[in-house]
Amino acid sequence: MAEHPPTPAKMSRDARRAGISAFAGTTLEWFDFYIYGSAAALVFGKVFFAGAPAAVGTLAAFGTFWVGFLARPLGGLIFGHFGDKHGRKSALVVTLTMMGLATVAIGLLPGYAQIGVAAPVLLVVLRMVQGVAVGGEWGGAVLIATEYAPPGKKLLYGAFAQQGSPVGNLLATLAFLAVAQLPDAAFLGWGWRVPFLASAVLMVVGLLIRLRLAETPEMTRLLEQKKDTGLPAKVVLTRYPGLLALGTCACIAGVALTYVKSTFALSWATTGDAPLFDRTTFLVIVSISLAVQVVGQPFGAVLGSRIDLRRAVFLMLLPEVIFLPLLFALVHTGSFWWATIGMALATVPHAMYYAVMAGVLSAAFPTEVRYTGISLSYQLCATVFSGTAPFFCQLLLTTTGTIWSVVGLGLLYVVITLAAVVPLLRRITVTAPRPAAAPAPAR
């Protein structure tokens, strides 16, 4: 019995392996999810809604994009329940498989010209499967990382899972940048399908990494106790409704702004009667901004673990009030370099905040309902705010005729986030490396 506790070296090795597994899995999931966004902005209106006016086709394509977000809370409920009752690892293997198969199926789906109205219907069904899969994936990946984390490093290890989002997004954008070099006929005919079909290879690699990982220590202890904690979703909704509401709103700036400045901006800048950029050029701009995010995002977790977290959050998000309007002003110049600078600057604030968001949410809920609690928080935000962002941005632009209405919506997202995350942080303690920083401030 005395040999049962793991050695520090083994704990460190397991923690690193868990971080790598979380990063690899979320990278694949987000690659699959984000290539749909690029395709919705550039292709789906023409392939699956042929015959409709361009603006209507774009709105319809963004509507199917939103469907994936509508399905995400369902994924959070299903896999949150499964993960809280039976373990994190098995739930994550299923979500990864679902996402990979649905993405490949989209790549094989005939367009409207071949099978008529069945094409958009099947597209919506497959997008829903994607949504269910990513809805269950994110919470489990975060917990794989944070529940293995050494004391005082949950924010840093939570950032491993968060890093999969910008890397997956960057890979998705680069994939579309590559196929966008094709002539229009080839791009619309088969080129856009290549990134979706390539997901099959990534799925196999992700599964091989994930299957080698053991269950988290916290979940293993809970399973050994065999305690009946009831239905996790019911517990979260009845015992922690305020925490769930705060968690949902605290995610907005971390996730919704991505779709304002990438998915919507990609469509706005490359379509219309007088497009500002061709699709290849703007995909390069988006790729550069995502590379900036990959490099800059982890510094949010570093900052949040070294100073008071509330202060860190304000330092991360307040610059967005300046950088988001600047982004659209610089893109509107039509200059590649000014647009690149604008996209890069607007990326850093919400990316750094996104890095700490996982650690904050995972600290808010107890172990027995943590998968369900953080999944519902994130996925309800995704449904209500993130998935609607491109649609409402396009609607605002169409009805008002000015891009500044879109900027106003983005700034509203920042305000709501700050209003939610401050009381949320007052209710939880995220362990910091300095003992004096650990207790929550009394106010």
Image (tube, rainbow, N blue to C red):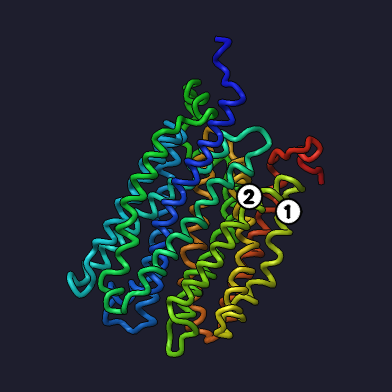
Tell whether 246 sits left or right of 389: right
Q: Is residue 133 visible?
A: yes
Q: Residue 312, labelled with which disc?
A: 1
Kind of residue indicated by mark 2: Val
Neighbourhood count class around disc 2 (C-alpha, 10 Å): few under 14, some 14–19, many 20 upward: many
Tell whether 243 sits left or right of 86: right
Q: Which residue is mark 2?
A: 356
Among all residues in the image, which is located at the extreme top?
1
* Spatial CA span between label 1 and label 2: 10 Å
Neighbourhood count class around disc 1 (C-alpha, 10 Å): few under 14, some 14–19, many 20 upward: many
Q: Position of residue 68 (x, y in %)?
A: 39, 59
Q: Position of residue 251 (x, y in %)?
A: 58, 55
Secondary element at tag 2: helix
* Residue at 78 percent of width and 38 percent of height: 434
* Residue at 59 percent of width and 39 percent of height: 365
* Residue at 37 percent of width and 73 percent of height: 180
Among all residues in the image, which is located at the extreme bottom?
273
Q: Earlier in the sequence, mark 1 or mark 2?
A: 1
Among all residues in the image, which is located at the extreme left?
114
The number of numbered badges drawn on the structure is 2
* Residue at 62 percent of width and 25 percent of height: 8
Secondary element at tag 1: helix
Q: Position of residue 143 (x, y in %)?
A: 53, 39
Q: Is residue 252 visible?
A: no
Q: CB under 8 Å between callouts 1 and 2?
A: yes
User: Between residues 414 and 291, which one lies in front from this camera angle?
Assistant: 291
Asked if 361 appears above or below 214 in the picture, the reply is below
Asked if 405 appears above or below 239 in the picture, the reply is below
Tell whether 94 sits left or right of 112: right
User: Between residues 131 and 373, which one lies in front from this camera angle?
Assistant: 131
Kind of residue indicated by mark 1: Ala
